Image (spheres, rainbow, N blue to C red):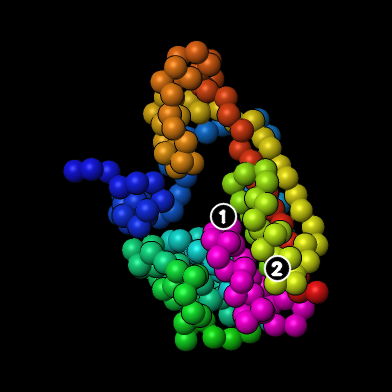
Amino acid sequence: MTKPEPHSRGWYALQARERGGYVHPWRRVLDGPEPENTFAALLESLLGPAVRVLEAGCGHGPDAARYAAQVECWTAYDRQPELLELAAANAPAAKLVLWDGRSGIPAGLEGIFDLIVSRRGPTSIIPHLPALAGPGARFLYVGPRMDVPEVPLRLAEIGWTVLSEWRERVRGWLPSEADYLLHCEFMNLTPDPSVWRQEATERGLPYFEERYTMLAAAE
């Protein structure tokens, strides 16, 4: 049976069945702090009992499971029904909606939100922010590269202002060639057999974990 193309609908369904969600499957050892800690710290600082949150691309619902009880409401969507089924089991306190983020806003997402978050999720939510955001709302995003230029560009198109940006790069190690191949698959990279042979050390293959974190608001 042919394996689905990475990040296709069939591939996401396979992740749900075989790995229990949208998770990084490779093992790694970092030489510094987890670069996604900035996003997590910002998210936690913006939560509160009166905050209404919308999560874009929730996957199997780890953030909804952790934070939904801390806010007035946590609404989340994903385009993949297999992942939403897992999210429903993991985060019973959250409201979950099936949506691709591109078509018209579905009835289940109608409402005004104080915080819209996307943890490596789709940037397609950005054009919908004016219809979903309440007064003073914030948009918090993190992406898996040092720069995600389409995010500030799309925000400028809808009249939103980037308040702060963080770019973090931490060296990591992939302990085995299997981990290297999994990393390439997940990151849409073409594996090169010579890379492991020529560059791997006793610790494994060096690489970099990168994150671009951004906080924005309506002008």
Nearer the observer, 40 or 128: 128
Does 155 sit left or right of 55 as displayed? right
| Picture quarter with the C terminus | bottom right
Residue 142: image location, x then y, percent: 64, 54
Nearer the observer, 188 or 175: 188
Which amino acid type is shown beneath numbered disc 2?
Glu
Q: Are marks 1 and 2 in contact (CB under 8 Å)?
A: no
Does 82 sit left or right of 145 as displayed? left
Residue visible at 23% across and 43% down? 2
Q: Secondary structure at mark 2?
A: helix
| Extreme residue in the left direction | 1
Q: Secondary structure at mark 1?
A: loop
Residue mark closest to the camera, 1 vs 2: 2
Residue 157, numbered label: 2
Residue 48: image location, x then y, percent: 70, 75
Determine which residue is flagged by label 1. 120
Residue 41: image location, x then y, percent: 71, 57
Q: Residue 104: in sight, yes or no?
A: yes
Question: In the picture shown, does residue 91 fall above or below 197?
Answer: below
Q: Residues within 10 Å of mark 2 (few under 14, many from 20)?
A: few
Residue 138: image location, x then y, percent: 72, 71
Q: Is residue 196 magenta?
A: no
| Picture quarter with the N terminus | top left
Q: Residues within 10 Å of mark 1 (few under 14, many from 20)?
A: some
Question: In the picture shown, does residue 75 fall above or below 2?
Answer: below
Which amino acid type is shown beneath numbered disc 1?
Arg
Residue visible at 50% across and 64% down? 58
Span colored in magenta: 114-138
Residue visible at 70% across and 82% down? 134
